[in-house]
Amino acid sequence: MRLKGAVTLLITLALFSPASLGAQAAPTKRPNIVILLADDWGFSDVGAYGGEIATPNIDALAAKGVRFSNFHVAGSCSPTRAMLQTGVINHRAGLGNMPETIPPEHLGKPGYEARLNNRVVTIADQLRNVGYRTYLTGKWHLGHTPDTVPTARGYDRALALAQSGADNFEDKPNLLIYDKTEWSEDGKPVKLPKRFYSSTLIVDRMIRYIDGEKASGRPFLASVNFIANHIPVQARDADIAAYAGRYSDGWTALRNQRRAAAIAKGVMPTGVAMVTMDSSGDWSKLTAEQRRQRAGAMAAYAAMGTAMDREIGRLIAHLKAIGAYENTIFVFLSDNGAEATDPMAMGAFTRWNANQLYDQSIAQQGRPGSLTAQGAGFASASASPLRGYKFTASEGGLRVPMILAWPGNPAIKGGTVAAGFAHVTDMPLTLLKLAGVMPQQGSFAGRRVEPMIGMDLSPMLTGAASSVHSADKPLGYELSGNAVLFKGDYKLVKNLPPYGDGRWRLYNITMDPGETKDLSGSDPDRFAAMQKDYAAFAKANKVLPMPEGYTAPKQILANALRTLLIPRLIALWPVGALLVMATAAAIWWRRRRRKQPLGSAKP
């Protein structure tokens, strides 16, 4: 067995050595890298992970590559994106919290810049330094100032959205949060076409960038960042029609179907236990109209996913046509778990505001002019068989599908599942190693930067190792007060309201990924030791306690009001001033008339 392991390791080293990857040869021998980042996709949304949504092109990548079944990100988008770009934990990269959820008391504190700070260096910077062309299209959400747009952080060309999401058919923001969209191209504000669909536009522009430098023969990094399936969930009519009636049995039935399919696909252990999430509600108690509305929203969600997959297929077909497919590393992942937030369930004011700004009729769901959301019930199915959603530190918020494929490299065991723990900070280092590029180790271009903390996942791609993370090395995480300490098979976790009660719990997420059995009482020594590990992480990374009464949903609303109300009041002040002057004049005139003696009026 030892001899067999040694031979496997030698083969792995040979196939993934810098020489075999072209590190000592011309830059054209290095592989291209395509990162396909989905937005708010749950663990089992992809067909290869047990989902019923049609994702044939992502599934084809899974058949060529390795599916990671224990891969973790942050609970919301920009912290994940910061770690994916830099290999540095979000608190050191500037995204201790994101702009939409950060309390004012934290903004600007070390690690809480709410943008990618200048103490980190991106994978694009490092690849461009060795001759790569670097392109980004779609959602950036890591800054909008001249020094934080993609072209200031290592990208040669970029069509980038600086916000968390936007309309998919119009150059229009989510009007509940923003007053305008912040799309830019190559660092300058850009107006989008009058008619477009977001996933198509994002791939169109990436193909244009790749083709524009094709003659150079240089390898490229293509970071393709979809806004599917972020709110507003929108898709073309034909895609929505394909899912008509598919979700009429409700989310509980779908959650159970997804669980069985995830086991059958090999991405979940046989017999995995599963909780019923309190916030999902009881499908059987809904009215017929409510069921039609929720099933229609889920149909739009599935349609948006299928549309995104089709565009991935179009990009892959183009790479095949230009002879770049075989020597391209593809990475597919989601930035966090499924989104349970629904504006129509956030209180009377938000619901009224959404109805004023959008057509929220059942018939219009997912179509232009609507603000559709999947909602908590079907988000529980997207996360199946995990607990929790986006924003939470539960597995449903942090564990996402991740596929890595390199079609022309025989070392990667296509169609296999890697069940060992892996983390988003592992990705930049892994990709650099696969490209034969020496990763930065605390300095870059003559300046000191935050060192990358990730591990090289290459041995998991070949089956030479089941895990690359040491069982005794802790990895901490925190966002909006929801916190985690990973260590080996175990996870210490707490969630603040409204997602939890603020108490620490302990789970074995290898045996119990659904987080159904709290081990804090039966394993008190481990529980205490991991709490000490988390305290050390929080101190080292300057994690701030959340203000009293903080919740992420309330903070989103408060920050949105500040963002929207003040500019609108400023814009309206001339009108207000005129109204005040007119009112004052009217009052003055009435008082003057009352003071005039009878008969004194002029003829």
Image (cartoon, grey):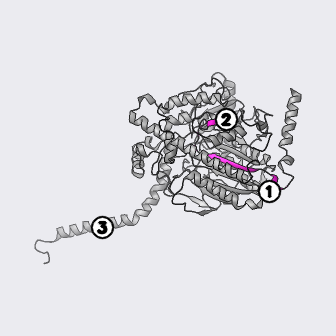
Residue 459: x and y, percent?
A: 79, 37
Query: Which secondary structure, mark 3?
Result: helix
Q: Is residue 283 above or below residue 154?
A: above
Residue 130 numbered tag: 1
* x and y percentages locating residue 160 in the rendered image: 61, 56
Decide: marks 2, 1 in contact (CB < 8 A)? no
Q: Residues within 10 Å of mark 1 (few under 14, many from 20)?
A: few
- Of the numbered discs 2 and 3, the one sitting upstream in the chain is 2
Secondary structure under the numbered disc 2 in the rendered image: strand
Q: Is residue 78 left or right of residue 556?
A: right
Q: Which residue is mark 2?
A: 485
- Say few, some or many: other residues with alpha carbon within 10 Å of mark 3 (under 14 / 14 to 19 / 20 or more): few
Up-down relation of residue 528 to residue 38 (above or below)? above
Query: How far, Cα to Cα, is label 2 from label 1?
Result: 36 Å
Mark sitting earlier along the chain (1/3): 1
Q: Which residues are magenta?
A: 25-47
Q: Is residue 321 magenta?
A: no
Residue 217 location, x and y as percent? 78, 58
In this picture, is 539 found above or below 567? above
Question: Does the magenta-highlighted stretch encompass residue 36?
Answer: yes
Alpha carbon separation for disc pair 2 and 3? 62 Å
The residue at 50%/36% (across/down) is 376
Q: Which mark is residue 582?
A: 3
Q: Can the viewer see residue 120?
A: no
